Amino acid sequence: MLKVYAVENLRSGMKVGRDIMDEHDQVLIGTGTNLTKEMIYGLLDRPIFAVYIEEEEAPGEVPGREHLLDDNYTSCYNDVYDRLSIIFSGLAERGEFNANDLQAIMDEKNFTELSDGAKAVSQIHNMEQTGSYLVHHCLHVGILAGLMGKWLGWSVLDQYNLVIAGLFIDIGKLRIPREILEKQGSLTEGEFDMVKKHAQFGHDMIAGTTLSANQDIMQGVLQHHERCDGSGYPRGLTADKISRFGRILAILDIYDAMASDRVFAKRKSPFDVFSTLYDDILDGKLDTEYGVLFIKHLCHSLNGNWVGLSNGEKGRIVYLDESRVRSLPVVQTSGGEFIDLGKNRDIKVTCILTANEVM
């Protein structure tokens, strides 16, 4: 039986269940190899986040329910959420925030923990989240930004700045009336015009802070709703005029908004979100390089997650062909049955389940 392990959780003696490939799709460690400490240390130095391990299956056991929530991750997430809430309140009430609060959030140990490969994706889906959707969404985008910076091999400084831009991506919505943001049903044209101002509002809010000197962050917040074909807002920029931060944050914003519960909409299956993203890539709205890289790496990170199925069952993703952008997973149901959703099109993934929904 194959089980997915985050690289940092590997142990000597584990048997590799599928070839471990490097960033150039060359085999690093072959199927059937028993891992050594030296091999694991080598993997930690590469942009590899999870590995398939072959394990013996106990009779009647369906693996994966254990350790759905990581206590250290959850504690760190909640601490950063509280600090980000304080920063948002300061900006809303006084037009400023304490730079030390942001520095505390960006402490290396926080985003080493929060943007920790496959763990990050599973944990932000597994946690039950109460409080402000806006703060949770911005924190999720910041975490995904940390992952993207690593996947792109950017410098530590660029990764740091991309995370900060993600954390402030929707700060401008604090200036939008709550009744509009939480409205059930379609917005009127006037209401939608108001919502579209949040990117400019956000830019203007952080322009009065110490972040104003950092154009990467400023442009990322302002441009995250621009689209490469010129159909976005607030300025209708085309690809050559949109910053790299703006093009990346557009993708992360769409993914988390669709994959998370909102007041006016239930979360969607990540595979439905990938399909939407890929359609937008093909239509020239989203950046091809960043979009395909995000989908490919996030697919990898979904291995091992529990999902709700359209037939009412629960299943755990045990295999996903990461070579195809639109591939669908093989899942093992709570009853032990394996279903290839790429072949059985009558059953679909409806959403990633939280830990409480799995148990």
Image: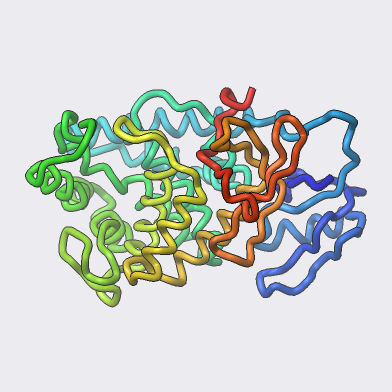
Q: Is residue 167 above or below residue 328?
A: above
Q: Is residue 78 left or right of residue 339?
A: left
Work out whether residue 82 can be spotted.
Answer: yes
x and y, in percent, of residue 84 in the image: 37, 35
Q: Depth check: 295 or 224 in front?
A: 295
Kindly identify the residue that appears in the image at 63 percent across and 67 percent down. Answer: 323
x and y, in percent, of residue 128 in the image: 50, 26
Kindly identify the residue that appears in the image at 37 percent across and 24 percent down. Answer: 131
Q: Depth check: 154 or 50 in front?
A: 50
Kindly identify the residue that appears in the image at 54 percent across and 32 percent down. Answer: 76
- Point out the image quarter for the N terminus: top right
Q: Residue furthest bottom?
A: 240
Q: Is residue 287 left or right of residue 2?
A: left
Work out whether residue 123 can be spotted.
Answer: no
Q: Is residue 46 left or right of residue 228?
A: right
Q: Is residue 5 left or right of residue 218?
A: right
Model colouring: rainbow
Q: Is residue 98 above or below residue 248?
A: above
x and y, in percent, of residue 327 in the image: 59, 59
Q: Residue furthest left?
A: 190
Q: Depth check: 286 or 104 in front?
A: 286
